[in-house]
């Protein structure tokens, strides 16, 4: 069937990126329809760090206060080495003159999406349709015809603009024949959660542990409430079978390497998962009436917490640009500018920095390792250099560079 009510914009994907795009559009009077293949909001345990400029943007659309009430504000984070211990403790308060949010906020992605959904539905301008899988699209005159498979069969809608916010395997991106340039890392990543409190060992709520054998990244998450959970990300050798990596002994050994406990010590495990990691960016974020945002447009390894944040930056930038176009306040050049700004930000900043972070943590050459550790100590000890370092790691420079692209 063909729907009788046709908003100007259709968004595929009801994750944070899709919902934020819909909310930004609605706040400027533009109606949209969001379709999601899953029957409801999904439970994603990978993303959960929000950087200062992202919090500024989320405050601008009215959701940051609710996030702060649920999350953990992280002023300090650490660079560590498994053999050498603490290398640097970074104080985000050095950015107090650069942002009203001189901290990271830790909050699971699945706690953000219900907040966003409530805000979206309250606007009265967004139709959210769950249980409908996008299957294809084609141009018909000035419109796009979008096909989806729902519980009762095929559904066809018409729209003027289609946004793919449907993740790294984006069917929208594939339907527009947009190349997803890049590569996949040979090792997979494992994520595990434990109620063991690493803070008792001197760890801040966010710490990156370099090690030539198996690096790790630690994050404290709020969970259902105090005392919260500690989430740990680590690489899994390509030769390790998935069932072995997901087995309890593998996780216990990984935790004991950090705590230094003997083999008789066991830690409570709440969650384990494993996934492949990619470094890819779409060669363009716009193809005629089709636009990409978030993981549909770019994916990277999680070191630095850039993926979700960059996706939110896409969503807010795209929402504003598209609203101006739909309302006739700007021509299509606003969307071409979105394409240039966000594509370049991901190629020249997110990809480069996330790859560098990974290589630094896994460095095996003793000379290079010693040099890197000394550089971290030196930079952290100098407030001016430390602030410059934090402007990069917090993504403030990413936003500034993107906005400078004409």
Image: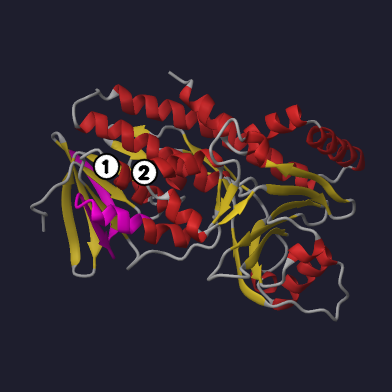
The residue wearing badge 1 is 27
Q: CA distance from mark 1 to mark 2?
A: 8 Å
Residue 354 in the image: above or below residue 242: above
Residue 242 % position (x, y): 65, 69
Residue 347 placement: quadrant: top right
> Is residue 134 covered in magenta?
yes
Q: Residue at x 10, y 51 (%)?
A: 5
Q: Is residue 372 above or below residue 110?
A: above
Residue at 22% across, 24% down = 329
Q: Are marks 1 and 2 in contact (CB under 8 Å)?
A: yes
Identify the magenta region.
Answer: 116-139
Residue identified by numbered label 2: 61
Residue drawn where x is 13% and y is 47% of the image: 6
Q: Secondary structure at mark 1?
A: helix
Q: Out of 242 and 54, give the one closest to the viewer.
A: 54
Residue 256, by quadrant, is bottom right
């Amino acid at each position: 069937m063909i729907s009788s009510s046709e908003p100007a914009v259709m968004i595929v994907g009801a994750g944070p990126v899709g919902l934020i795009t819909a909310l930004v559009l609605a706040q400027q009077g533009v109606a949209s329809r969001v379709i999601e293949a899953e029957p409801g909001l999904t439970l994603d345990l990978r993303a959960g760090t929000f950087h200062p400029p992202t919090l500024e943007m989320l405050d601008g659309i009215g959701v940051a206060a609710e996030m702060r009430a649920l999350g953990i504000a992280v002023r300090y984070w650490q660079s560590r080495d498994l053999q050498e211990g603490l290398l640097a403790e970074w104080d985000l308060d050095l950015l107090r003159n650069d942002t009203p949010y001189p901290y990271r906020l830790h909050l699971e992605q699945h706690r953000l999406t219900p907040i966003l959904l409530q805000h979206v539905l309250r606007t009265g301008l967004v139709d959210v349709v769950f249980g409908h899988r996008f299957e294809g699209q084609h141009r018909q005159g000035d419109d796009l015809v979008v096909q989806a498979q729902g519980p009762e069969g095929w559904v066809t809608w018409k729209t003027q603009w289609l946004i793919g916010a449907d993740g790294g395997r984006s069917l929208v991106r594939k339907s527009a024949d947009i190349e997803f340039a890049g590569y996949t890392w040979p090792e997979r990543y494992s994520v595990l959660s434990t109620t063991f409190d690493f803070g008792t060992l001197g760890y801040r709520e966010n710490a990156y542990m370099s090690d030539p054998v198996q690096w790790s990244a630690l994050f404290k998450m709020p969970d259902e409430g105090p005392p919260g959970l500690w989430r740990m990300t680590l690489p899994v050798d390509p030769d390790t079978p998935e069932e072995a990596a997901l087995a309890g002994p593998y996780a216990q050994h990984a935790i004991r390497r950090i705590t230094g406990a003997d083999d008789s010590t066991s830690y409570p495990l709440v969650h384990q998962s494993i996934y492949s990691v990619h470094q890819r960016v779409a060669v363009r974020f716009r193809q005629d009436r089709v636009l990409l945002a978030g993981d549909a447009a770019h994916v990277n390894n999680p070191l630095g917490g850039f993926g979700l944040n960059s996706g939110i930056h896409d969503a807010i930038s795209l929402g504003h640009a598209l609203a101006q176009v739909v309302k006739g306040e700007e021509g299509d050049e606003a969307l071409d500018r979105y394409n240039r700004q966000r594509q370049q930000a991901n190629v020249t900043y997110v990809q480069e920095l996330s790859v560098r972070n990974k290589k630094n943590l896994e460095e095996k050459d003793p000379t290079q390792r010693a040099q890197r550790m000394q550089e971290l100590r030196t930079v952290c000890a100098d407030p001016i250099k430390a602030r410059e370092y934090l402007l990069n790691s917090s993504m403030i420079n990413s936003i500034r560079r993107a906005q400078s692209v004409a």
